[in-house]
Amino acid sequence: SGEFVQVGSLHGFAITDAAEGVPVSVSREGVYSAPKAGVEIHQGNKLYFDAFNKVFTTSVTGVNLAVATEDAASGDPTCALVLLPETEAASGGGGGHDPDGTTIDLDGSNHLRVKAAGHTHPGNEITSVVAQASHATSADTATSATSAGNADTLDGHDATDFATSGHTHSDLPTGDEKAALAGTNGTPSGTNKYVTDSDPRLGGGGGGGGPDMVDVTVALGESTATTAPAPGHVGWLALGVLPAGADVGVANVVVNVDGSVTLTTLAASTAGSAFKVCLFNPGS
C-alpha cells in the first residue's frame, strides 16, 4: 500500500497491498510523499518515474507523470508531489491528453481524450462557420461593400480585402468632384447643379450661348415678379425688356445669382402686365 504503480498508460499509488498478478486499486489524485532519487528538487519541477529503482527523479525518463509541490534536498529520501494525467507523447502520436486542452478526440483505443495539439474539423463543420464569420468567402465582402465613401474601412477591413473580393472603387467620386459638391451658389440639387469656375455660363467664363428671351408676368395688383431659378442663366445679364400688352413702364430688371429674373414696374399693374426680357451671356 502506498507504493507507486505503473502499468502501461495507467499509473497511481496503490491503496491496498496486493500480490503480484492480483488487481489493485490505485489513487490518481492528490498530493503524495514518494521515494526520490538523490537529486535536489525544487517546487514546480517536472518529475519522472525511474521504474528500475522505483524512485521519482528530475531526469527525463519517459513521460512526465508528476510535479513537485515542495523543495527537497538531494539527501532527502522522499519528496512531495502531485500526479499529472497522462500527456501526449513528444512524437505527437495523439494517444494522450492535455488537461489544458479545449477539444476532445478519440485515440486508437476509443478512449475519450483531449488533444494537446488542438483539433481540426472538416470544412462542413464548425470551421466553415468560422470561415464565413471572418469573411473568408468573397461573396460576403463583395455584397457588404458600399460606395458611400467609407468602404475602405467597412467592418474593420482595409481596401485589400475588398479588392481581392472583386469590389472596385470606380464608382466613388474623385477628390475634385467631392470639392465641387459644395456648389458655387445655394444648395446643389437636381435643379441647381454645382458650377465650376470654367462654366461658360459664368461672366468671364469659357464662352458660348447666345441671347435668350424670358417671359415675366406681373400679377394683377402687384408691381414685382420673379421667375423660377434657371441654372442655365447663372451669370447672365438683362439686355432689354419688351412689353407685351403692358400699360406701365419698367423701373428695374435684375438677373439674380441663381439665374432667375426679377422685374419691377413703375406702378402697380391694374390688369396684369406681361414682359419679355432679353438676356445675354457676357462671357460669350
Image: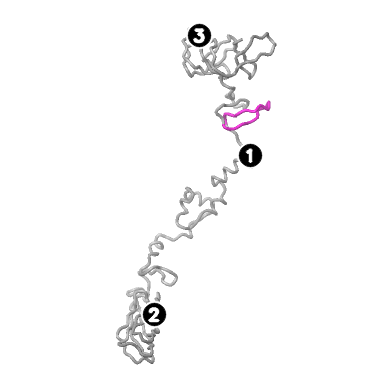
**Whether residue 123 is situated above or below residue 232 in the rendered picture:** above
111 in the magenta segment: yes
Q: Is the C terminus in the top left, top right, bottom left or bottom right quadrant?
A: bottom left
The kind of residue tagged 3 is: Gly
Which of the marked residues, 2 or 3, is nearer the chain's N terminus? 3
Mark 2 is on which residue type?
Thr
**Dot 2: element:** loop
Residues packed near mark 2 inside 10 Å, few (<14), some (14 to 19) or many (20 plus): some
Counting from the top left corner in percent of width and height, residue 75 is at: 48, 7
Q: Alpha carbon of mark 2 to alpha carbon of mark 3: how far?
A: 109 Å
Mark 3 and mark 1: Cα distance apart in space? 50 Å
* Residue 89 covered by magenta stretch: no
Residue 87 in the image: above or below residue 41:
below
Q: State if disc 1 and disc 3 touch (CB < 8 Å).
A: no
Q: Magenta stretch: dominant SS?
A: loop
Density class for disc 1 (Cα within 10 Å; few <14, some 14-19, many ≥20) is few
Q: Nearer the viewer, mark 2 or mark 1?
A: 2
Is label 1 in a helix, a strand or a loop? loop
Q: Nearer the viewer, mark 2 or mark 3?
A: 2
Magenta residue span? 102-117
Q: Residues within 10 Å of mark 3 (few under 14, many from 20)?
A: some
Q: How is the image coloured?
A: one colour
Relative vertical location of residue 64 with respect to residue 154 in this rendering, above or below: above
For mark 3, give the secondary structure: loop
Residue sitting at x 55%, y 45% = 133
Residue occupied by mark 2: 227
Name which of mark 2 and mark 1 comes first in the sequence.
1
Residue behind mark 3: 38
* Residue marked by disc 1: 122
Q: Quadrant of residue 116?
A: top right
Q: Amino acid at mark 1?
A: Pro
Residue 270 or residue 131, whichever sits in front: 270
